[in-house]
Image (cartoon, grey):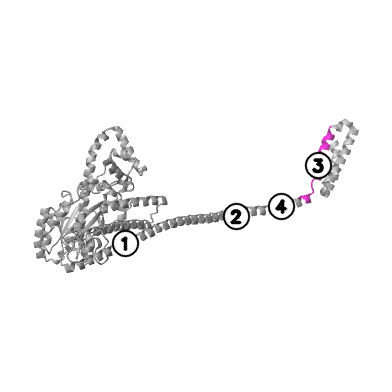
Amino acid sequence: MEPRRAVPGPPGWGPRLAAGSGTAAELVYHLAGALGTELQELARRFGPEAAAGLVPLVVRALELLEKAAVGPAPDSLQVSAQQAEVELRRLREENEHLRREARAGPQEERALLRQLKEVTDRQRDELRAHSRDLLQRSQETELQEQLQRLLLVNAELRHKLAAVQAQLRAAQDRERERELPRGVSLLGTFPSTPVMALGFPQVDALQQPGRPVEAGQCGFSREELEQILQERNELKTKVFLLKEELAYFQRELLTDHRVPGLLLEAMKVAVRKQRKKIKAKMLGTPEEADSSDDEDGSWPLLSGNKEDDTPPPESRAQSFFGLWYRGEAETPQAESSGTSPSRLAGEEEVPQQPHPAPVGSPQAPDS
Amino acid sequence: MNLLAPVRRDRVLAELPQCLRKEAALHVHKDFHPRVTCACQEHRTGTVGFKISKVIVVGDLSVGKTCLINRFCKDTFDKNYKATIGVDFEMERFEVLGVPFSLQLWDTAGQERFKCIASTYYRGAQAIIIVFNLNDVASLEHTKQWLADALKENDPSSVLLFLVGSKKDLSTPAQYALMEKDALKVAQEIKAEYWAVSSLSGENVREFFFRVAALTFEANVLAELEKSGARRIGDVVRINSDDSNLYLTASRKKPTCCPGG
């Protein structure tokens, strides 16, 4: 029965429902009213208990309907959707922009860094080159100074040598002049004792060899000539040694073979020492050589005649330390090297010997 | 560290220069003494740094001693005669078998009046070069006297002798052949090596001095090897003991790290 009664209801609302689709909430309230009436009717007819279970369910259903009907208006939804779309587009653009920026950013930075690095590298290289240049220049000036000094000494010695040679030549000329009238050679050799050719004014002067002779008046005594020769030999030796030293330093300059200042100092000392020794050898003056290396075998054929100069055998030890230290009279190693002089001599000299290198070098003097 | 300036490239001897005449030569070996070659290869030539040999040049006046030296050392020739006063010397640096070696060539006066000064410089010569004029028999005859004078100051057993005929350019081949016969006889007699040169043309000058350098060098090194060889015998005893062997290796290193001491 109830369904029947209920049936006529809905057809009555049907059109209204269709027409008032816009106001779904009103329809819900209407429906709620209708349902309330129906439920009251039920309670009245069958007692309140009959609808008691139904009411809360219906109320709940109606509430749900109401909520659905009252929800946001369709047009506001549309607006918010449009807004969302705009927002989305904006965000997308921004995203794009940011992404582009992000992509471009590090590249720029990297380029900048690279540039910076190049600049610092260049500056570092420049600094290094600069310091190298400075070092080179200081060394060059040092060598130049030495060269200047050597050239000066050399010139001085040449001058002295020339003077002595001129003196000698003059003496020779005078000698010849004197010889001419006499015809024969002047007593064979230069007499060391006062003996002179007859009837010449020089006789007086020469009768006292120690007495200074007036220029042009007479020649030289044998002692004087020997002295002059000795002096000339010494000067010539000096010139030779200086030439060697000069050639050595010139080679150092030319080959750009840089030597640190400390080593240069040591080299200078060694050169000086060596020079002394070579000089002694060349002039045959044992007093300078006997304390060092006269016996190291450089005059093997000579040693037979120079027994008086033969130093004690220990002095051989000095030759083991090579070129640089031969001159040193006191060598602490003397006893240790004494254990096997020949072995040491053979092996220690090896580093001193590689001389062939400079031979082929294009800086060979006079070549 | 080489403290010596480099040797001129045209003063480098890699092999033994040969003699002029086999019948009057100090020796006729094709090469340096094997011990010398070996020592040079192993750098055991003894004296480090500066090896100098003294060479004296004697002979009659105006035979051309100074010219001979000047041709070799300075490559010059002066036609004018200028007597040498007393003595003079020239240094000539060589490199023989890779070892620096120097000749100090003492040019002595030939004039009688200077003889007593010049003779004071004879001492300590390793080689004596007696020069005579190939066109003057008397100068050849005088060579024996010159040699006798020079040997008074030197050890005849160890000194090397060279008999050099000069002014070869002035003699015709026939004249030269005659003179050479006599000269060879003298050379054999005095045990000298014979050479004939011309300082004017330069003929044989370089060859001769190279031969002098090579033979003095050889003698020099051999003498040194002999000396060190004598010492080596004494060392054998020490080497037998293990203790001194250790000591040897230690002391051998020592000089390299603190050579100055």
Report, in whole angstroms, how far the alpha carbon at label 3 lies from the one at label 2: 56 Å
Q: Position of residue B78 (x, y in %)?
A: 22, 67
Pointer 4 local density, CA inside 10 Å: few below 14, some 14–19, many at least 20: few
Secondary structure, mark 2, is helix
Give the chain of mark 4: A
Report, in whole angstroms, how far the alpha carbon at label 3 lies from the one at label 1: 136 Å
The reply to whether label 4 and label 1 mark residues of one chain is yes
Bounds of the magenta segment: A53-77
Secondary structure, mark 1, is helix
Pointer 2 local density, CA inside 10 Å: few below 14, some 14–19, many at least 20: few
Q: Amino acid at mark 2?
A: Ala
Give the chain of mark 3: A
Q: Position of residue A175 (x, y in %)?
A: 21, 65
Residue B89, visible in the rendered structure: no
Check the image and report above or below for A138 versus A296: below
Q: Main secondary structure of the magenta part?
A: helix
Dot 3 or dot 2, earlier in sequence: 3
Where residue A65 is drawn, which disc sits there?
3
* Residue at 12% over, 60% down: B140
Dot 2 or dot 4, earlier in sequence: 4
Please give the residue where the numbered disc 1 appears in the rendered image.
A160
Report, in whole angstroms, how far the alpha carbon at label 2 lies from the one at label 4: 25 Å
Please give the residue where the numbered disc 4 appears in the rendered image.
A87
Please give the residue where the numbered disc 2 appears in the rendered image.
A104
